[in-house]
Image: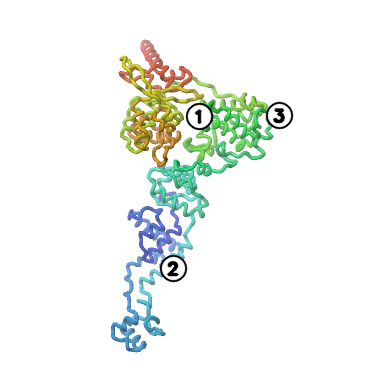
Amino acid sequence: MKKNEAPRKLHSGHFAFMRALVQGLDEKSSWNRYLHLEGEYTDLRTVRRTIAWIRDQFAAAARRENKPGTARLILMDAERFAAAPALPTLAEFAAANGLEDFSEEEQLEAYQDAYPQKEKGGGQGGGQGGGKYGGSRGAGRPSRRARLVEHQLEALRWLQGLVAQDPKPGDSVAAWLNPSMATRLERAGLTTLAALVGRINGVGARWWAMVPGVGEGKAARIVEWLQANEALLGLRVGVHVAQPRMQLASATLEAVVPAATAIRPYEKFVLPGGLDGRAGRFRAPPEKCLLTAGNDHEAIGAWLASKQPASGKAALSATQRAYRKEAERLLLWAVLERKKALSSLALEDAAAYRDFLADPPVAWCAPRHHQRWSPLWRPLEGPLNPMTLRQSLIVVRTLFAFLVRQGYLVGNPFAAVAIPVHHPPRPLGSSRALTFAQWDHIDALLERHGETEADRRLRRGMRWLYATGLRLAEITSVRCEDLTQVDYRAADGSTASHWLLAVIGKGNRSREVPVPAEFVEELGDELARHGFERQVSAVSNRGIHVMSRFDDERKRPAAWSASGLYQAIKAFLAQAAEGLDGADALQLKKASTHWLRHSHGSHALQGREGQAPVPLQIVQNNLGHVSVGTTSLYLTTERDERLKAMRGFWKSR
């Protein structure tokens, strides 16, 4: 055992397995029944190593109790002692020796002469089936092997009462799991059983995907052991873990985390009676309020509803989700940290909230890929940088301005809070865009990535994002009917055909973005592969998302979620970084879906060697920018020319 490493603990399964071995039961079935968590029985090295460890632990416990004899007894192998030969019954002996017509007393006397090791006497009522020698073979004094087995079983019962333990939530995973498996879990930050169950419940069926070295088989054994020990641990593995997330009903996911007055998403946050805002310090007279909202939670809901796009879609728009995030943070902070209703916040509270966002407690932070149904979800990723903090405070100020205009509040405490200064934006492509060489490396890896449905879907997602410059929310929402084939006049005067994709972007603004014809053909091939019309624009394909998952038995494929696409691309880029060195590897490790959008803008405006740059207005349309000034931030040509010119000037001095 390494220094400071938690010692492994013995549980009832270890004792049950050893009792089975001592009694000569089948080793394989006993292993699979009691110690399946340790690994597959086919890994004989693990089996032998584990058996040796258990015996050593048993012997060490006996020595600690000053029972050296018991320690030696535990280590003895009963198989070394041959079993006593099977002896005939009295009736069999009599028949074999022609003594059927003799009296039982005479038969017994002859039997004892033939087998002198047997005890004398006791032949009462023997006959053909009873008595000491009547019906059982080998009855008499137990063999040496049998006596050893009996003593070992007795020793095991004594040891189990002495050293067997029950698992506890705070125990190290190394105390209960196979050492190699525990090491892999610890490297992934899962150091205790409580942390392990939390990760499993927080991620679901594929919780093991982010734990290198733990595959589906090992993960299943871990979950099986945790479920078997739920009562002892007081920790429950949720039913949602048994199925892939895409196969779960929304109600199942929603039930994973109950509503409570705790760090919860807005829709599950329960306002306590005294802090719900009904009697908020800065509530306006109810008769002058234009909202039907009775508390702060409902008032936020009214504000979010006012941002609903004219299309009337039930799902929240990207703007609504962004606004909900900011209102949610403030509501949670006001109640849980400040112990105030949102409608009781004063100027001092607003300033304190600004400071909170700049340095939030660890308990409020988690990676953003944890979805809202997950117990691992948190409202923040970490401290907000000045630009993000500025945007957050502007949104909150907008919320309070709305509530004041509607007569819900009498004032806006955030109106007087100093907001971080806005610095001139740096070129968008300067730090969060790939170089041409980096993209070519990624594209080559995509080409060789594989031909499973998931491989093709990832390839489709990354190439479409780079080629079109769409946002993550946009690419995951477009459907087959949004693609239109149009004819146009080519540069040489001939008529050509191409595809346009209709997109609804920020602010509910629509635009049409060109899409490579080969991409549409590949989408048609995927549709045909799964029994749909090859022609993408066919009526029967209406409603099918461009980023659909064709990996289940549903009649209509489900849309690939924005978070699912994001995580898949992040994982692929991390793998792509392994084939690079230095700055290139660091760039790819940091890259995300939005980098592909930045790369589209930067590469299109720069133009590859031998290719003309794309006009600024066309790139502006592709990216969905309201202002051409925003798109021009991708341009670095003018900056580079100025630097080269000044360098020449400086050298002349």
- For marks 3 and 2, give the one nearer the viewer: 3
Residue placed most toward the observer, 39 or 188: 39
Residue type, numbered disc 3:
Glu
Residue placed under numbered mark 1 in the picture? 318
Could you say which disc has been placed on residue 259 in the image? none
Q: Residues within 10 Å of mark 1 (few under 14, many from 20)?
A: some
Q: Residue 170 placed where, x, y %?
A: 50, 49
Could you say which disc has been placed on residue 287 in the image? 3
Which quarter of the figure has residue 453?
A: top left
Q: Residue 392 placed where, x, y %?
A: 55, 28
Q: Residue 94 placed where, x, y %?
A: 31, 84
Q: Earlier in the sequence, mark 1 or mark 3?
A: 3
Picture mark count: 3
Residue placed under numbered mark 2 in the picture? 154
Secondary structure state at the residue bearing disc 3: helix
Q: Earlier in the sequence, mark 2 or mark 1?
A: 2
Compared across the picture, whether 599 is left or right of 253 comes to: left
Which image quarter holds the C terminus? Answer: top left
Compared across the picture, whether 290 is left or right of 23 comes to: right
Question: Is the residue 40 above or below the residue 327 in the image?
Answer: below
What is the spatial separation of the Cα atoms under label 3 and label 2, in whole angstroms?
82 Å
What is the spatial separation of the Cα atoms under label 1 and label 3, in whole angstroms?
34 Å
Question: Is the residue 99 above or below the residue 162 in the image?
Answer: below
Residue placed most toward the observer, 320 or 389: 320
Secondary structure state at the residue bearing disc 1: helix
Residues at marks 3 and 2 touching, judged by CB atoms closer than 8 Å:
no
Give the residue at x 42% y 67%. Answer: 153
Residue placed most toward the observer, 578 or 462: 462
Residue type, numbered disc 1:
Ala
Residues at marks 1 and 3 touching, judged by CB atoms closer than 8 Å:
no
